[in-house]
Each structure stands twice: as structure tokens, then as C-alpha cells.
Image (spheres, rainbow, N blue to C red):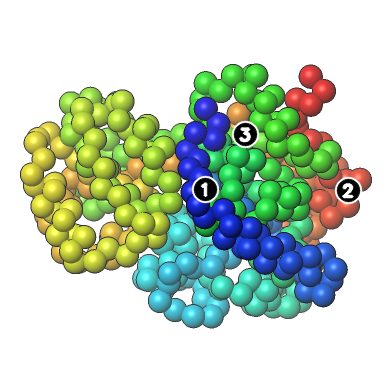
């Protein structure tokens, strides 16, 4: 059910109140205009959350890249969390993972022709990508990864992701819960997406969640779920792709260093013979002792066996020394992608494409002659229709 992964540390609630006061005061300064938010001529779409990790930001950014890359010159700007470089950096074909972070590296491997950049200071990153909004800019639209709290940038569309299993309405502020901001922060979103929904979500549950989120009429609400693709070998020369339905007689070592591995474990357990989780902290950099533990644990498992890991973890593992040949031959990555529920895909796509079409100067969309009338999230009168069950 919704919110079933939430755990509140009640004894930390006094610290959450202090934290909430600080965050609310910061937001108040932005609302007064004392701290400034900057808008840009180039279309900017932000994808983020108000919780600590685990809402599926990267798969949703990748969805937007696939939607836009053949129609516009799209760039992704990420913070590059835990990278070993500073300042603004554009990922090249051979840029090593430690220089740009695992998420940016993952996207560059998937979309080699797309501009992938990292900069902790997003305003500077946007200025570098757009050449200060000059007409010579080669970028039509910028996707900001994990920038909902980066209020110095005023995006054209602000997308807020909410994990179905950790609905913000049931959570608490850090450190008692995992909220980065008070629930009221969701009001800044143009689009709210409830992610990681069960495939068999009942109509009544949609209605309950919609009512509980209590969005404004100018906000659009969508629901997405996760689809798994066939397993792909991390070290491709030794293995072939493998369908998930072939795991019935296989002992699986599930290796993950992500914020919320529980859903992955619950999804793999019913389809494998056994599942042995080996979990680390989010964005964990594997050390020699971790690799030794992995090699030893896998050697001790009964055959047939394999190792399954996430795309983000695989991005870090490929640059890690010490993996045994046995591990390399049986190490698979599990690619994921998101799919929209309630037949909402076309509506979402049109919201995004319409905004880019209206605001981009050079894209194929901007030059099209037979396009539909676009939307512009800067003006409440032009905002997309809220998709909800409030009046049903």
C-alpha cells in the first residue's frame, strides 16, 4: 500500500522542527525576493523531489531525454554527486565515472550524442550551456536533474517526483523522516508524478492519493510504474542478455548501493530461487574490502547463480579493480524504464513538447508548421489541465 516504506524516528522530531524552521525561512526569503530566482530564455525543465533519494529521478530524466533528443538539442545538467572534480564539466565520450558521478556517467553511456554536464552551481552550469542566453547557443532545452531545492533557478516546468511507497503526506522532515522540505513545498511544482506505483493499483487508490495530495488546479498529476528490461552483462564479452523469467532455478546475489533497494528486492525475490541482498549506502564507492566481500560471498553461493545490480551501481563497478573473473562472468545489470499509468503518456508528452515548442528558438518543434497549440507553465492561464479524480 502507499506509504508502506515509511519509518519515522519519533525521538528525532524536535530536531526536525528546528530543521523545518531553517528550511522554511530560506524559502520565505525566496518568496520575498531577498534571495533571487533567475529565469532563462532557453527552456529549462527541472526534475526533483522533496525527499532524500529513491524517487526514480534518473529514469524519469532518461524518459525526457528519449522524448526530446530527436526533436531538440537537449542537455542534461546534474550536480555530479560525489564526483572527484569541481566546477562545470561536460562529459566526453571517454570521461571516467569518478570525474562526473555515477548518474551522469550512466546517462552519457546511454545517450552518447546528448550533452551531459555537471555543476553543483546550476546557474553557472546553465550559463555555460547557453552562453549566457546568446543567439549562438546550441542547446534548445535543459533538463535539471535533482534541482527542486535549487531555487536560484526558476525552471519553466518544475516536476516533483513522489514515491508511492513514501508519500510525502505521511513522511516527516529530516532527521526524523526523509523530507528535505515541508510538505507545502509541493505547491511549487507544475507537475507531480507519483512514482513506483504497483501495476495493479486500484482506481480507488488513485482517488485516495489524488485527494490526499490536495494539489492546486494549475498542477498536473501523473502516475508511473517501473518496467524492468532483460538483464544485460556488465562485462559484455562473456555473456548474453538474459530474460528475468529465466531466474526460476537461479540463486541471485542482489548487489545495490541505492537509496531505496527494498522495492528491487521485493520484485526479484518471487522470480528467483533465492535472493541474497548485499546492500550499501546510496552512491557508495566500492572499496577493496567491499570487492573482497563480494568475491567471497559469490564464491560460497550454490550454482546456478548470478549477480544482479542496478545501472547506477554498474557505472561504479566498471571502474573498480579487484573483481574476480567468476564475478565478472556472472555480473548482470538490470535496466529500468518508467511507464505512465491511466493512459496518461500522451498527455504528459504533449505538456512537455508544447512547452519546449513555444519557448525554444531553434528546435524542430519550434519550426513545425502543423503543431498543436503549446502550453507555457510560466502563466497560470496556460498551464496544463490537472489530471485528477477530484470531481469523479
Work out how far the residue at label 3 is from the one at label 1, CA to CA, in angstroms.
30 Å
Instruction: Check whether the beta carbons of the residues at disc 1 and disc 2 lie within 8 A of each other.
Output: no
The percent position of residue 107, horizontal first and vertical second, equals 47, 57
**Residue wearing tag 3:** 223
Front disc: 1 or 2: 1
Measuring from the top left, give residue 356's x and y in whole percent.
Answer: 75, 53
Q: Nearer the viewer, residue 86 or 216?
A: 216
Circle 2 residue: 380
Q: Which of disc 1 and disc 3 is earlier in sequence?
A: 1
Quick one: SS at disc 1? helix
Q: CA distance from mark 2 to mark 3?
A: 22 Å
Q: Residue at x 58, y 44 (%)?
A: 171
Label 2: how many residues lie within 10 Å, few (<14), some (14-19) or many (20+)?
A: few
Q: Looking at the picture, tell me which residue is in the foreground, 172 or 253.
A: 172
Looking at the picture, tell me which residue is in the foreground, 67 or 343.
Answer: 343
- The answer to whether any part of residue 345 appears in the image is no
Q: Quadrant of the C terminus?
A: top right
- Relative vertical location of residue 183 with respect to residue 19 in this rendering, above or below: above
Left or right position of 310 against 113:
left
Left/right placement of residue 388 relative to residue 326 reads right
Element carrying mark 3 = strand
Q: Which residue corresponds to mark 1?
A: 10
- Callout 2 secondary element: helix
Q: Residue 19: image x %, image y %? A: 62, 63
Q: Position of residue 21 (x, y in %)?
A: 69, 63
| Of residues 225 and 137, the one drawn nearer to the viewer in this rendering | 225
Identify the image quadrant of residue 22: bottom right
Amino acid at each position: 500500500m502507499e506509504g508502506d516504506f515509511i519509518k519515522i524516528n519519533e525521538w528525532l522530531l524536535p530536531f526536525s522542527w528546528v530543521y523545518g524552521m531553517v528550511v522554511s525561512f530560506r524559502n520565505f526569503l525566496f518568496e520575498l525576493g531577498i534571495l533571487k530566482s533567475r529565469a532563462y530564455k532557453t527552456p529549462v525543465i527541472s526534475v526533483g523531489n522533496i525527499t532524500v533519494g529513491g524517487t526514480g529521478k534518473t529514469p524519469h530524466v532518461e524518459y525526457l531525454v528519449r522524448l526530446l533528443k530527436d526533436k531538440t538539442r537537449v542537455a542534461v545538467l546534474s550536480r555530479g554527486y560525489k564526483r572527484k572534480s569541481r566546477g562545470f564539466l561536460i562529459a566526453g565520450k571517454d570521461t571516467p565515472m569518478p570525474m562526473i558521478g555515477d548518474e551522469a556517467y550512466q546517462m552519457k553511456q546511454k545517450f552518447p550524442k546528448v550533452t551531459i554536464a555537471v555543476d553543483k552551481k546550476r546557474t553557472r552550469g546553465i550559463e555555460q550551456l547557453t552562453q549566457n542566453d546568446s543567439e549562438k547557443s546550441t542547446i534548445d532545452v535543459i533538463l535539471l536533474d535533482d534541482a527542486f531545492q535549487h531555487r536560484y533557478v526558476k525552471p519553466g516546468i518544475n516536476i516533483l517526483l513522489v514515491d508511492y511507497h513514501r508519500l510525502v503526506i505521511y513522511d516527516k522532515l529530516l532527521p526524523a523522516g526523509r523530507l528535505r522540505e515541508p510538505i507545502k513545498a509541493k505547491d511549487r511544482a507544475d507537475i507531480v508524478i507519483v512514482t513506483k506505483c504497483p501495476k495493479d493499483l486500484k482506481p480507488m487508490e488513485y482517488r485516495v492519493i489524488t485527494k490526499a495530495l490536495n494539489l492546486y488546479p494549475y498542477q498536473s498529476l501523473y502516475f508511473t510504474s517501473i518496467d524492468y528490461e532483460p538483464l544485460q552483462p556488465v562485462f559484455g564479452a562473456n555473456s548474453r542478455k538474459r530474460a528475468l523469467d529465466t531466474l526460476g532455478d537461479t540463486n541471485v546475489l542482489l548487489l545495490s548501493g541505492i537509496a531505496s533497494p527494498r522495492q528491487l528486492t521485493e520484485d526479484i525475490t518471487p522470480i528467483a530461487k533465492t535472493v541474497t541482498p548485499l546492500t550499501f549506502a546510496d552512491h557508495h564507492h566500492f572499496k577493496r574490502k567491499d570487492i573482497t566481500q563480494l568475491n567471497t560471498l559469490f564464491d560460497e553461493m550454490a550454482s546456478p547463480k548470478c549477480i544482479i545490480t542496478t545501472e547506477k551501481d554498474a557505472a561504479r563497478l566498471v571502474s573498480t579493480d579487484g573483481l574476480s573473473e567468476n564475478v565478472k562472468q556472472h555480473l548482470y545489470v538490470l535496466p529500468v524504464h518508467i511507464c505512465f499509468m491511466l493512459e496518461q503518456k500522451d498527455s504528459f508528452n504533449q505538456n512537455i513538447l508544447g512547452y519546449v515548442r513555444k519557448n525554444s528558438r531553434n528546435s524542430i518543434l519550434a519550426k513545425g508548421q502543423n503543431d498543436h497549440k503549446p502550453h507555457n507553465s510560466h502563466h497560470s492561464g496556460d498551464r496544463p489541465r490537472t489530471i485528477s479524480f477530484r470531481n469523479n
